[in-house]
Image (cartoon, rainbow, N blue to C red):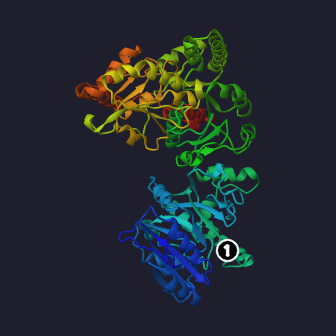
Amino acid sequence: MQSTSAGVVQFSPSRDPIVSVIIVATGAAPDLLGCLRALAVNTKDVPFEVIVVENGVEPSVSDDLAFGVSGVTIVRSGVNRGFAGGCNLGALQARGVYLVLLNDDAEPEPGWLAPLVESVETPGVGAVGGRVLLSDGTLQEAGSIIWKDGSSSGVGRDLPGDAVSLRFRRRVEYCSALNFLVRRELWNELGGLDEGYFPAYYEDVDFCLRIAERGNFVLYEPRSVVRHLESRSSTQRYKEYLCLTHRRKLLERWPHVFEGPTHAEPIDGDSVEEAIHLAMGSPPRVLVIDDRMPDSRLGSGYSRMFDVVREISAAGYRVSLFPTIGIIDDPDVLGALGVGVVTEPLAEHLLRRSARYEVVIISRPHNFERYGSMVRNLQPEAHLCYDAEALFHRRLEAQAELASEDAAREALCGAADEARAVEAEMARSVDTIVCVSAEEAAALRVLGAREPLVVEPWLSELSLTPAGFAERSDVFMVAGWLAGPESPNVDGLLWFVHEVLPIVRARVPWVRVRVSGPAPPKVALDAGGRGIFFEGQVSDMAEFYGRMRACIVPLRFGAGVKIKTVEALQYGVPTVATSVGAEGIDLRGTAALLVADDARDFAHGLVSLLTDRAAWEHRRAEIEALDALRRSEATRVTWGSILAEVVGGRMAERLRPEQRAGI
C-alpha cells in the first residue's frame, strides 16, 4: 500500500478488510490526492480498503482519480449530497468491520489506524476519534466539547500538537468526523449520519449523541494523528451561518440532553477541564506523585507503580500523574491506560477550581518531604496516601553494613538517619500508608504508623511462559541502572561475577548471563567479559523470559519487595535469589524460589537449574503451584479495594442521611 515512483497513488485493497476508509470529495477537492498519498504511505498495519465518494465533484477530480489513483472503490454521485449523504452513500459499499470517516483534506500520520482499531475494542465503545493537527502542527482538537448552549469546540485548539497534558485516552461527548472510526454494525443500526444537517456541520455531534442514547460511548485516542487543512471548501462566513443554524437544530432535537448539570458553560480557562471531566462521567479523581512516569521496563519500583496506576484506572477512577523530575518518558504508555500527566507546576495545578482530588498518592520519601504539606494546604479535603514501595532508611542501613571504608559507612548512616526521620514524619501524618510486605509493615509500625496496609506486588498482566527445559538456555539478570554506580544492581552484579560465576563456570563452562537495562554505568560494564552480555532495553520481556533457563537476583542490600523476583516467578522462570532479593515475597508454603546468601550455595543452586532437568522441572512446578494459589485467593487487599473504601466513605460523609441510605 504505497505510492509508486511514477507518481500514481496505488493501493492493494485487502480481500477481507477490517476497516473501510470512506473519503467524501466535493467540488474541486484540491487536497484529495495529498490525502490519498498520505493514506497509502502511512497505513501499513491494518487490512483496509478505500472508498472515495465523488460527491458532486468537478470533472478534473474524476480525471485525477481515474489516471492518478489505483486500487480504490469509486462511488459517484452527480450532485452534492452533503457530507452526511456522501458518507452514507460510501458506507453502502463498505466491507470492513469498521468504517473510518476521513476528510479529503486530512493527511494521516504514520501508524494512525491501528490505535483506532485497538481502542474500539474497549467494552462499551461505539466509536473512536483521533488527534487532529492543523497544517502548522498545532492542535485543532484532542477530542471535542459540547457546551451547555449547544456550541462546540475542539479541546486544546492552538496548543502544541504534542501537548502531553492531552495525550491520554478518554471518554468524550464527540469527536469530529474527519478522523473517526465506528463499528459498521452500529452505523447501520443508527442509519448513518443525519442528512438533514446539509451540507455540513453538526451531523457528527448528532451521531455521537445517538451513540450515547443507545448506551455506547465515544473515545478519544491521541495516538491516532491526522493533519487537517481545515475548511478550504467553504468561506468562514458561510461556515458560521451553517454552524449557528445546525446548532439550533441540535438543541431542538436534543432538549433533554442539555438540561441539568451535564454540560459546562464556557466561562473561563477551567471550564474546558470541567467539560472534559463531565464527558468522562465525573469519576472520582486520583493524583499520583512520583519521580517519573511509570513504565514496566524501567525497574526501581516503576514497573510496580505502572501496575498500580493501571489497576486504579481500570477500577473507574480518573488518574493523573505528576512526575516530579519532569517529562522525560513517553506519555503514550500511560495515555493508553487513560492516565493523564500534569505538566504545570503542582501548586498552580492544585489551586485550580477544576482540579479537585478525592485521593492523592505520594511515592518516595523525598517527594513526600517536598509535596506533602503542599497537598494538605491546597487540597485539604483530599485523602492523603503514602505509597511505601520501599523504606529507604532500611536500604541505606543495609548498604552501610557492606561499606568497606569508614567515611562511606558514616555517610550512608547519616543518609539513613535522614531518611528515617522523613519516613517517620510521613508515617505519623498521612491518612493511609500502603506498603508491599509484612516486614515493611512491621517497620512502619515502629516508625509510628497506625495501620499500614499491605498490597503484595503481583503484576496483573504477567503469565507463565510455556517453554520447557530443553527449549531454554542462559541466565537472566534484570537490572535497572537509574541509581548509577551506587545501584544495588551494580553491587549485586559485581558480587555475582567475582564470587559466584567462577564456581558456576567450573561446572558449566558454557554459561551465558544476559543482563538487561539501558545505559549501565561503566563500573558494571567493566565487570563484564566472557559470557556476560548487556542487552540494554528489552522490548518484549515475555519473549525474552521465555528463552531463559534461570534467573538470578544477587542483591546484597535493598528494601521492599524486588519486582524483578516477582516478575521472574510470574513468567515461570526458576530463580536463585539472595535473602535480600527474596525479601517480602510470601511463597504460600511452596518452594517456588531458591534462596542463598553464601556464594557457593548460590552457585550450586544455579548449576542445578542449568544442568538438572528434574531439579528445574520441580522448581517450575512449585512456581505453578504458587501462581495457582495466588489466583485462587478471592479476598486480598488491592489498590482498588483501598480506594473503594476511601472514596466510598468520603462520598457517604458528604450526603444527607436520607441520601446515604441509597448508597
As drawn, the residue found furthest toward the left would be 614
User: For residue 253, what is the image quadrant?
Assistant: bottom right
Q: Position of residue 145 (x, y in %)?
A: 64, 59
Q: Amino acid at mark 1?
A: Ser
- Foreground pick, 292 / 457: 292
10 Å crowding of disc 1: few (<14), some (14-19), many (20+): few
Q: Is residue 58 above or below residue 193?
A: below
Q: Position of residue 454 (x, y in %)?
A: 49, 24
Q: Quadrant of the N terminus?
A: bottom left
Q: Residue at image x 46%, y 59%?
A: 117
Q: Is residue 584 visible?
A: no
- Foreground pick, 411 / 425: 411
Q: Position of residue 560 (x, y in %)?
A: 51, 22
User: For residue 578, what is the image quadrant?
Assistant: top left
Image label count = 1
Q: Which residue is mark 1?
A: 231
Does residue 116 appear left or right of residue 270 in this picture?
left
Q: Residue at image x 64%, y 38%?
A: 323
Q: Position of residue 383 (x, y in %)?
A: 63, 30
User: For residue 252, what is the image quadrant?
Assistant: bottom right
As drawn, the residue found furthest toward the top would be 406
- Foreground pick, 197 / 157: 157
Q: Residue at image x 59%, y 59%?
A: 173
Does residue 380 appear left or right of residue 87 in this picture?
right
Q: Is residue 504 above or below residue 169?
A: above
